[in-house]
Image: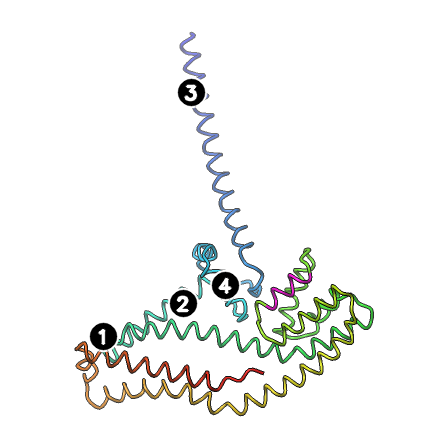
Amino acid sequence: MELHTLVALTTGVTLLTCVLAVVGIHIYAAGGAQRAALIDRLSYTGELPDSGRRRRFRTLDRRLRRTTPGRKLELRLAATGLDVTPGEFLVGMLAAAAALWLVGAAALAPFFGPIAGLCGIWAALRFLDWQRQRRIERFIGQLPELARILANATQAGLALRTAIGMAAEELEAPAGEELAKVADQLSVGHSLDDALGELADRLPSRELVVLVTTLVLSNKAGGQVVSALRNLTETLEERKETRREIRTQLAQVTMTSYAVPVLGIGALFLMDGVKDGALARMTGSPIGQACVIIAFGLYAIGFVLIRRMSRIDV
């Protein structure tokens, strides 16, 4: 009788242990999923637009953001305003590089495959820089109107935080989007210095730095914000016109800088079209490969020099 009771007790304890183990595993898995979702939400700094679409490569995104290059890439993507995560951009860039590798190897010669792949990676990163600079230029164009709205709001007796929220509602993108992020940061307890400093880091420009410095100093020292913003509005209007004139004058030089490497690539296709297999034979020896690499290097140097000579900082 005692043996039967011991067996029943042991069986009951074993079953209870199994049930608790299953429940514990379930709770652990659910907690892990909730933790991953929370990390995924908190990892985004609010830079991505809320499009509602399903994000891809979430695991890759989390791993990228733990690295310094991944955080820099996320900051660059945030400055462009594109609805793309770091993982999506990295996968897309590598896929494009692989496709260009295959196309270059098939259309020209196997030697040009790696060069085409590297050019694809370079073009993707240059696209980010171009998109970022384009957004910065649009933001700079809205700075005079932004300063005017802030001046009118502060003159009406509104606090600077309230004036920023009002400007975020009235202005279009990208100024409206960026100011909305600043207003959200201020609403959750961030200081004005930190919120405006992050804005200047996302969209670096001299004009924005001047505006941020004016607002921060006026907020700290309690100076005449209205008069400072009025004077800043006139200055920004003049700089806007000056930048427009310089951009018009240098349009031909800018096109020349892009035409130089395009002519070099076109010459390769022309050579291969005139005599089929010419590039394969040329790159079949170390001397030919060295000559091609040197030629590409010279085209790259020419592109950089033309861009540097045509750059005028205002």
Image coordinates of residue 207 in percent, x first then y, are 63, 76
Mark 4 and mark 2: Cα distance apart in space? 15 Å
Mark 2 falls on what kind of element? helix
Mark 3 falls on what kind of element? helix
Quarter of the view holding residue 119: bottom left
Image coordinates of residue 309 in percent, x first then y, are 46, 86
Q: Which residues are magenta?
A: 192-200
Camera-near label (1 vs 3) is 1
- Assess whether mark 3 and mark 1 are in contact (beta carbons under 8 angstroms): no
Q: Is residue 279 above or below residue 78?
A: below
Camera-near label (4 vs 2) is 4
Of pointers 3 and 2, the one earlier in the residue sequence: 3
**Residue drawn at (49%, 77%) of the image:** 130
Of pointers 4 and 2, the one earlier in the residue sequence: 4
Residue picked out by circle 2? 92
Residue picked out by circle 1? 110
Specify the label residue 11 is tagged with. Answer: 3
Q: Is residue 39 magenta?
A: no
Image coordinates of residue 268 in percent, x first then y, are 27, 85
Q: Amino acid at mark 1?
A: Pro
Camera-near label (4 vs 3) is 4
Residue picked out by circle 4? 74
Q: Amino acid at mark 4?
A: Glu
